[in-house]
Amino acid sequence: MKRVIRYLGVGATAATVDISLFTLFARQLGYNYLVVGFFTFILATCVSYVLSVRYVFESGVRFERAHEIMLVFGVSTVGLAINQVILYIAVGKLNVDLLLAKLVATGVVFGWNYLARSRFVFRGSP
């Protein structure tokens, strides 16, 4: 349970980076939301990885670090696809507000990332 709580803090930090920059560039400056979503997601993934191995998961327990990073970004690629599909459907097809769509996408991807990382990448960590 402690690990889930720590991951919530890490996720909140990464989500703040993602959503803040997404809002600035897509909503305020008018850049394409899918392009912005791609780049802010990648940046947030980097933030999440660094904080996760520092505060949540023990790095190097199951895989060597380079392999571990590749797996994290593999999991995150699926998360990015989920994020982009939700944004496209919500904003592009259903005319949902950009920020609301991003919040929904972030919540869904948060759940995916935690489950996939804890089961497939960092399994066996404390």
Image (cartoon, rainbow, N blue to C red):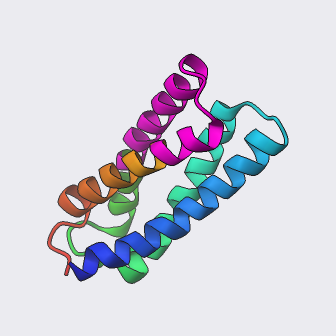
Q: Quadrant of the N terminus?
A: bottom left
Residue 60 visible in the displayed image: no
Quadrant housing residue 101: top right
Give the residue at x 32% y 77%: 5
Q: From the top left corner, tell me how far across and down residue 102 is, in percent.
A: 56, 43
Magenta span main SS:
helix
Q: Is residue 11 left or right of residue 58?
A: right
Q: Position of residue 13 (x, y in %)?
A: 54, 70
Quadrant (top left/top right/bottom left/bottom right) for the C terminus = bottom left
Q: Which range is magenta?
A: 75-104
Q: Quadrant of residue 115?
A: bottom left
Q: Residue at x 25, y 82 (%)?
A: 2
Q: Is residue 27 left or right of residue 55?
A: right
Above or below 120: residue 47: below
Q: Residue furthest right?
A: 29
Question: Residue 46 falls in which quadrant of the image?
Answer: bottom right
Q: Position of residue 58 (x, y in %)?
A: 29, 79
